[in-house]
Image (cartoon, rainbow, N blue to C red):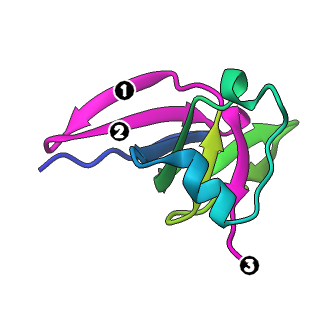
Amino acid sequence: MEILEPIRDQVIIRPDLSDTAKKLKEADIELPSNAPETAKGRGIVVAAGPGEYQNGILIPMHVKVGETVLFTTYEDTREINGEKLHIVSERQIMAVVRTK
């Protein structure tokens, strides 16, 4: 069994292949009119690196394991243990999806 452990500001996301628009509407989330062009995916964070150093200070990650996020693009897709996972930089995550 392989386990991906991201470094720096990298995040491993399990893509949510269900109807994104329906879920966003149910959660009362409105995206800008250009969202279909910018929001490339929705998924669940399965692992996150520790953060990134800036001027010798560790800036911790904003996203946490288990959160559902919207992201603009991904750097790579890997199949691990039969499951496709996206690797993204935290900078590519647009929002955390929360329910009311």
Residue 24 image point, x, y percent: 65, 55
Crowd class of label 1 (few under 14; some 14 to 19; many from 20; radius 10 Å): some
Look at the picture and state if 27 lies above or below 94: below
Give the quarter of the figure containing the C terminus: bottom right
Crowd class of label 2 (few under 14; some 14 to 19; many from 20; radius 10 Å): many
| Residue 49 shows in the view | no
Quarter where residue 15 is shown: top left
Q: From mark 1 to mark 2, how far is it between C-alphas?
A: 6 Å
Residue 3 image point, x, y percent: 26, 49
Left or right, 73 with reference to 78: right
For the residue marked with disc 3, what is the amino acid?
Lys
For the residue marked with disc 1, what is the amino acid?
Thr
Q: Is residue 92 magenta?
A: yes
Q: Which residue is mark 2?
A: 85
Circle nearer the viewer, 1 or 3: 3
Q: Is residue 79 magenta?
A: yes
Q: Which disc number belongs to residue 100? A: 3
Q: Tag 2 or tag 1, which sits nearer the N-term? A: 1
Q: Which residue is mark 1?
A: 77
- Residue drawn at x 36%, y 26% is 77
- Residue drawn at x 54%, y 47% is 20
Circle 2 — which element? Answer: strand
Q: Which residues are magenta?
A: 72-100
Circle nearer the viewer, 3 or 2: 3
Residue 91 image point, x, y percent: 73, 34
Quarter where residue 39 is shown: top right
Residue furthest to the bottom: 100
Residue 31 image point, x, y percent: 79, 43
